[in-house]
Amino acid sequence: MSEPHPPRIMLVVGEPSGDLLGAQIITALNKLTGGKVELSGVGGPVMEAEGFRSLFSIADTSVMGFREVVPKIPRILKRVRQTADFAEETQPDAVVLIDSPDFTHRIGRRLSKRAPNIPVIKYVAPQVWASRPGRAKIMAEFVDHLLCLLPFEPAFFEDYGLDARFVGHPVTERVERGDGAAFRARHGIDPDRPLLLVLPGSRGSEVRVILPIFNEAMGLLKKDVEGLQTLIVTVDHVADKVAAQITNWPLPLTVVGQDEKIDAFAAADVALAASGTVTTELALADVPMVVGYKMGWLTTLVFERLIISPYMSLINLIARKAIIPEYAQDSLTAQDIVEDVARLLTDKAAGAEQKAGFREALEAMGLGAVPPSERAAQAILDIVNGAEAKA
């Protein structure tokens, strides 16, 4: 009797946030199988650092907003076909679609028609309970198993016929403490002056729309907060766009890449961030923050009436109150955000209040329990083994 083959798992991501999740899954799968797992699919540089070989660069698919998406539609659709064809040809034991629904769901739909024998697992349940809940019914047509990050999600999705399980939020296992003092010394940042961390987003469309507003706010903060220094952490594929937007930055500025992110968080006193996963990472790093988000006018025209969630930030959503000040769309103006940013920079009590709220919300998301990536990887292996048992 021949030995069973190692689990063959295809991972598919389409943008940097999924790349981080994919890397955590790779580490967990290798740990749980003793390295006896065969991985393939689409990933980014963080996954590739774990030894993963991607079919193509996720720069082709990491886009958001109509202005940025439309010119790339032919290439995106080509990558969808290429990925689905690869799965059909190689017949993995499961395909795990990670985040990036605009890209990964197209692949799932193609596989449900052309290779229905391959289990399709969706990792990171899209927040359809926050906008367009009807998408859950559509997703049930091509997703076999759903891995949820938040404790209230399985019950919601099970009502739509989806096999859903809570695995915890993977950001809660990224608790790394950087060396803020060493970072400041390394970059010539005065240790006795306040430092504001500015995070303009990881997509080109976010940088284009949001960073000019943040830039304008810096001019106002220069008058309100004496000796203020600023810091931007960016990602490689939008670094050029960031550079183009900061030529007239009014405050002392240091720009670093993702490789220094943890130390940068430790060095910062306060953050001003575009809404996204990074806000939860900031909460884990105990960095008080103000959050903003704005889409281009055409994207806004389509989506603004579909949003039903009262909050953008996961911390606020879990806490069910505005621990973090949020500004979205028309309310995201330089004048509106400056008051909250300045208050956090000058009032330690305000920052301490935020940090206490962070801790409560993070514990509800799984902080301190079994690492979510291990729970997700175990769920994937359980599904694969179950599929093999039925074959």
Image (cartoon, grey):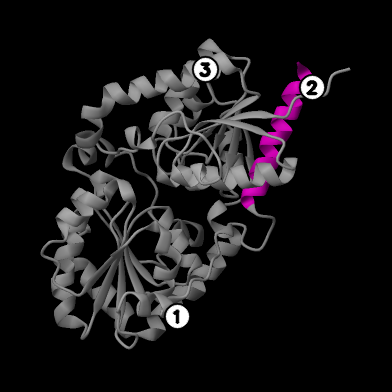
Proximity of marks 1 and 2: CB atoms separated by less than 8 Å: no
Q: Secondary structure at mark 3?
A: helix
Q: Position of residue 16 (x, y in %)?
A: 41, 45
Q: Is residue 387 magenta?
A: yes
Q: In the rendered image of this protein, does residue 17 appear above or below residue 355?
A: above
Q: Where, quadrant-wise, is the N terminus in this rendering?
A: top right
Q: Is residue 375 magenta?
A: yes
Left/right of residue 369 with respect to residue 197 in the rendered view: right
> Where is residue 381, by image quadrant?
top right
Q: Secondary structure at mark 1?
A: helix
Q: Can residue 75 be spotted in the picture?
A: yes
Q: Furthest residue to the top? A: 114
Mark pair 1, 3: CA separation: 49 Å
Q: Position of residue 341 (x, y in %)?
A: 28, 73
Which mark, by number, is residue 111? 3
- Depth check: 301 or 92 in front? 92
Q: In the rendered image of this protein, does residue 26 appear above or below residue 81?
A: below
Q: Furthest residue to the right? A: 1
Give the mark, 1 or 2, whose residue is nearer the N terminus: 1
Q: Position of residue 226 (x, y in %)?
A: 20, 86
Q: Residues within 10 Å of mark 3 (few under 14, many from 20)?
A: many
Q: Residues within 10 Å of mark 2 (few under 14, many from 20)?
A: few
Identify the amino acid type marked 2: Ala
Q: Position of residue 240 (x, y in %)?
A: 22, 50
Q: Which portion, as a residue range, is magenta?
A: 372-391
- At a point 45% along the width and 66% down the height, the residue shown is 262
- At a point 50% along the width and 27% down the height, the residue shown is 139
Question: According to the image, label 1 marks what residue?
Answer: 352
- Which tag is nearer the camera, tag 1 or tag 2? 2
